[in-house]
Image (cartoon, grey):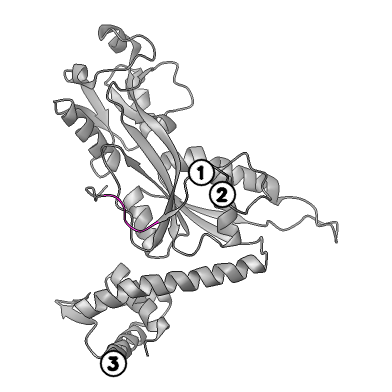
């Protein structure tokens, strides 16, 4: 009979790539991991890993076991979540990994709201109550955030995809649409006047081919989005500056240094010095919440998801998602895109 603990070790090996990294993640010694893998091979009746240079790679049998392990471990996580829900526990730590603009616009208000609702007085003792729920935040690009989720280093990933750049989600995860927002063309007012664009008027991207461009770095999916949008408009952007901080790009636009495509949520708080325009051929960005399959029933994670998906909901309302919100989906739905 296959041992679930050894399946978990094999799953971690598939995610981390080496025995040493797997051992560190599971708080085991490398020899212990190797022994468990050897025992699993005996249980399976065939090799599940094989040497490739100085590393190990999964055999076909190993890949098959990892695929089934994802399902088995998701069901175990669901069972654990169900038990936690029955206990009505309100305490916990939720680890969130989000891209920068989501961390600023979505996680920061969530953190503040939790801080406001967690404080209070214990009815029995009259003393200040201990915080019911706390967050841990890591700011990462979407690909890195999903990798953290796959490695179980985070509980919830906030990621995005673009209409021109669909995203591929890992197996054994659940994702739900949090919001959709337009990508806007940001120009200096003088540039907008030269193009004959009135305030808020849709812009034809093909008319900007001669202008200098300001973009995020090539390691980001936002950079690839801009390349595709400009390519669809028939030109390659002439990039004069790169920064993965959209507030830097907006500040450069405000000086007339160039133009930029910026998702609405990534805009700075003050945009008076910018001329902002939707695109004639719209590009939008979709924000998703992504968690490992079976974990959304955890009371602490469920509360965080409820507050993210419906900020107007009273903090004690943590049952089902509000009507009209997209249901979480499981598995891989979209096509891959280049690394960020």
What kind of element bears circle 1?
Answer: loop
- Above or below, 223 relative to 68: above
- Above or below, 236 relative to 207: below
What's the CA distance linking mark 1 and mark 2? Answer: 7 Å
- Above or below, 119 relative to 64: above
Front residue (pair 152, 323): 323
Q: Is residue 263 left or right of residue 196?
A: right
Residue occupied by mark 1:
325
Give the dominant element type of the magenta stretch: helix, strand or loop: loop
Can residue 247 be seen from the camera position used here? yes
**Rendered residue at 23%/21% (across/down):** 205
Q: Position of residue 147 (x, y in %)?
A: 34, 59
Q: Position of residue 337 (x, y in %)?
A: 23, 48
Please state the extent of the stretch shown in magenta in the rendering.
Answer: 330-334
**Disc 1 to disc 2: CB gap under 8 Å:** yes
| Disc on res. 192 | none
- Sort mark 1 into few (<14), some (14-19) or many (20+) by Cα contacts within 10 Å: few
Residue occupied by mark 3:
42
Front residue (pair 230, 107): 230
Q: Position of residue 81 (x, y in %)?
A: 56, 67
Q: Which part of the image, by quadrant, shows the N terminus?
A: bottom left
């Amino acid at each position: 009979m296959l041992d679930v603990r050894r399946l978990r070790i094999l799953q971690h090996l598939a995610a981390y790539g080496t025995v040493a990294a797997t051992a560190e993640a599971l708080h085991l010694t490398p020899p212990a991991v190797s022994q468990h893998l050897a025992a699993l091979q005996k249980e399976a009746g065939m090799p599940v890993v094989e040497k490739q240079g100085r590393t190990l790679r999964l055999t076909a049998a190993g890949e098959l076991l990892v695929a089934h392990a994802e399902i088995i471990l998701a069901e175990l996580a669901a069972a654990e979540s169900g038990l936690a829900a029955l206990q009505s526990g309100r305490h916990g730590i939720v680890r969130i990994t989000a891209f920068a603009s989501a961390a600023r616009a979505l996680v920061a208000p969530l953190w503040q709201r939790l801080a406001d609702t967690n404080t209070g007085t214990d009815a029995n003792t009259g003393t200040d109550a201990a915080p019911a729920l706390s967050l841990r935040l890591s700011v990462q690009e979407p690909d890195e955030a999903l990798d953290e989720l796959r490695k179980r280093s985070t509980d919830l990933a906030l990621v995005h995809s673009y209409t021109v750049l669909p995203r591929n989600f890992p197996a054994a995860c659940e994702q739900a649409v949090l919001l959709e927002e337009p990508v806007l063309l940001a120009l200096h007012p003088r540039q907008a006047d030269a193009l004959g664009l009135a305030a808020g008027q849709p812009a034809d991207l093909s008319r900007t081919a001669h202008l200098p461009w300001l973009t995020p770095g090539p390691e980001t999916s936002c950079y690839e989005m801009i390349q595709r949008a400009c390519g669809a408009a028939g030109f390659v952007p002439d990039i004069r500056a790169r920064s993965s901080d959209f507030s830097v790009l907006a500040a450069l636009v405000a000086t007339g240094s160039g133009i930029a495509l910026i998702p609405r949520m990534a805009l700075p708080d003050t945009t008076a010095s910018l001329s902002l325009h939707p695109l004639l051929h719209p590009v939008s960005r979709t924000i998703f919440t992504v968690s490992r399959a079976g974990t959304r029933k955890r009371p602490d994670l469920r509360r965080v998801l409820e507050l993210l998906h419906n900020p107007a909901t009273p903090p004690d309302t943590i049952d089902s998602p509000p009507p009209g919100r997209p249901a979480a989906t499981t598995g891989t739905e979209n096509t891959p895109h280049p690394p960020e």
